[in-house]
Amino acid sequence: MPLYEYICADCGHEFEKRMRFDQAGERPPCPRCAGKDTRKKLSLFSSAGNASGGAVSTGSCGSGSGGFT
Ligand SMILES: [Zn+2]
């Protein structure tokens, strides 16, 4: 669930709330003054998707030289 930041327009209280995606358009009431004039701030994106897949290819092809005698 993404974590959204809200700020209350009445008392200026900032709070965070986890909302589901289908609830993202709703505005939760302020936990301090119970005002409904809350605005969503920029959402916090936790960028934890750095999958470093490194295919290390140590190709040491030792070709033996065959000599005809
Ligand atoms: Zn408030």
Image (cartoon, rainbow, N blue to C red):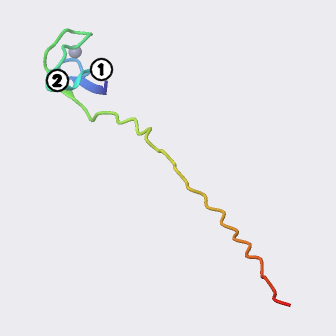
The local crowd at label 2, few if under 14, some if 14 to 19, many if 20 or more residues have their Cα within 10 Å, is few
Residue located beneath label 2 in the image: 22
Q: Is residue 3 something that shows in the picture?
A: yes
Q: Would you say 11 lies left or right of 68 here?
A: left
As drawn, the residue found furthest toward the front would be 69
Number of numbered discs visible in the structure rendering: 2
Q: Would you say 47 lies left or right of 25 here?
A: right
As drawn, the residue found furthest toward the right would be 69
> Which amino acid type corresponds to the residue marked 2 in the rendered image?
Asp
| In the image, residue 45 above or below residue 5 | below
Question: Any mark on residue 18, and which?
Answer: 1
Q: Is residue 14 something that shows in the picture?
A: no
Mark 1, secondary structure of its residue: strand
Snapshot quadrant of residue 44: top left
| In the image, residue 32 above or below residue 68 | above
Residue depicted at x 81% and y 86%: 67
Across and down, in percent, residue 32 comes to 26, 10
Marks 2 and 1 close (CB-CB < 8 Å): no
Mark 2, secondary structure of its residue: helix
Split into quadrants, the picture shows ligand 1 in the one at top left
User: Which of the two discs, 2 and 1, sits closer to the camera?
Assistant: 2
